[in-house]
Image (cartoon, helix red, strand yellow):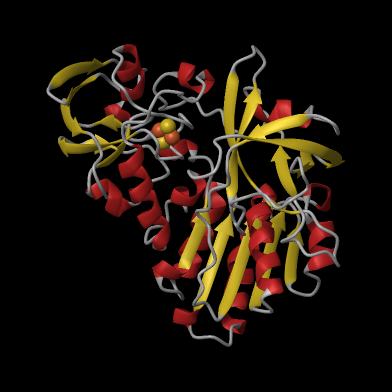
Amino acid sequence: MRTFTKGRGGLAGLFRSSKEAEDPNAEDRAAALAARAERSRPEPSREQEGDTSAAEETPDRLTMHVEAVDHSWDGIALITLRTPDGAPLAGYEPGCHADFFIKGPDGEELIRQYSLFPMTEAAADEHTIGRYGVAVKREPDSRGGSIALHQLSAGDTLDISAPRNNFSLAPSAERSILVGAGVGIAPIYSLARELKRQDADYTILYFASSAERAVLSHLIEEHLHGQTRSVFATGARDAQAGYLQTALAESGAAPEDTHLYVCGPQGFMDSIIEVASQTLPKPNIHWEAFRASEETLAGDHRADGPFEVVFCGETYEIPEGESVLDVFEDEDVPIMSRCQEGTCGTCVVRVTAGTPDHRDSFFTEEQHENGAFATCVSRSLSPTLTMERWKNI
Ligand code: FES
């Protein structure tokens, strides 16, 4: 799903498969992530993990059938997946995503995250039918993930994880403003379908560079007609603040009762969050990001060099160009990882001394302040970081 190179310790990490070993932090992490899902993000840096406790009760992998792959859009594939028995996917919730286990060009396993949304006919009950859509943008710098998905065809199968949800609807919202750009419309559409089902008050702002790239516009037209303001034009994002301000001003609900959800490229989300923050309380602003921005991954260049880690009484040298996770794995330190790019939180440890340079896009500032450190991407501004296993959040 992503191929950023700068600031990532060890590109080889992109090609590592998920670890099969017992996760020594699993219990703590599940509790932490579940707690994390309970609160809205207070800072505009991203969004992620959800009801993992529920997800972890379901099988690690589910084999989905590829029912259709639609290439009608410029560089974007709309893939329809179906559960083997046609029943609803266990753990599916509006706004959720799943890990996709994809065979890379050299046979290695790549793990990428994509949002799932219902693919049902207008008259059908989406809660009774196990068909889900995935919008996959072919990344120009793809290392194989998006390319492999674009090469799928009807009749193929694809393994995914149990769904996880970091982007749940706030039950207390009187009004919801949903903002999506590019394939970021996918979780937005999923949320909107649920709001429509609830007959709730919502508005969608949908930005795409052209109608040819507006992959879900036909579904929105079919299912959510009248609730969407679509802007399909290159450069139109310059005007996005105005559209958002209008949507906020139109709200009959008080700011504290209005919630905003946004998904799209990091820069897009940052600008939407900035505008929304002028009106809405920060806890009412929710965002979903599956990839860190290059800026986030680059971090502070002063932390690009080598540093030392003291972990559980042992000292490890982290060379330039390698991550803490790389070194831990080389030294057989048991640690789980998944995304290898700072977006899932799986590789977390707690920093107890030193000055980290956080390069993940998963943890909140509050969690960073509490010591959360993503070993796959983050580095150190001090010569030494002292760490311990993650205990709680
Ligand atoms: S493995 Fe996902 S944040 Fe490090």
Q: Is residue 288 above or below residue 174?
A: above
Q: Residue at x 46, y 48 (%)?
A: 52
Is 2 or 97 nearer to us in this picture? 97
Would residue 78 be found to the left or right of residue 321 on screen? right
Q: Position of residue 93 (x, y in %)?
A: 60, 57
Q: How many marks?
A: 0
Q: Is residue 124 above or below residue 69?
A: below
Would residue 293 be found to the left or right of residue 98 on screen? left
Q: Residue at x 54, y 66 (%)?
A: 169
Q: Residue at x 46, y 40 (%)?
A: 343
Is 76 or 106 nearer to us in this picture? 106
Q: Position of residue 317 (x, y in %)?
A: 22, 15
Tell me the quarter of the picture where residue 385 sits.
top left
Q: Residue at x 23, y 49 (%)?
A: 369
Q: Quadrant of ligand 1?
A: top left
Q: Position of residue 46 (x, y in %)?
A: 46, 51
Q: Is residue 179 above or below residue 337?
A: below
Direction bottom: furthest residue:
252
Q: Is residue 320 visible?
A: no
Is 232 or 378 nearer to us in this picture? 378
Would residue 352 be found to the left or right of residue 55 on screen? left
Q: Is residue 355 above or below residue 194?
A: above
Q: Is residue 207 visible?
A: yes
Would residue 270 be found to the left or right of residue 151 on screen? left
- Image quadrant holding the N terminus, namely top right
Q: Position of residue 234 (x, y in %)?
A: 73, 51
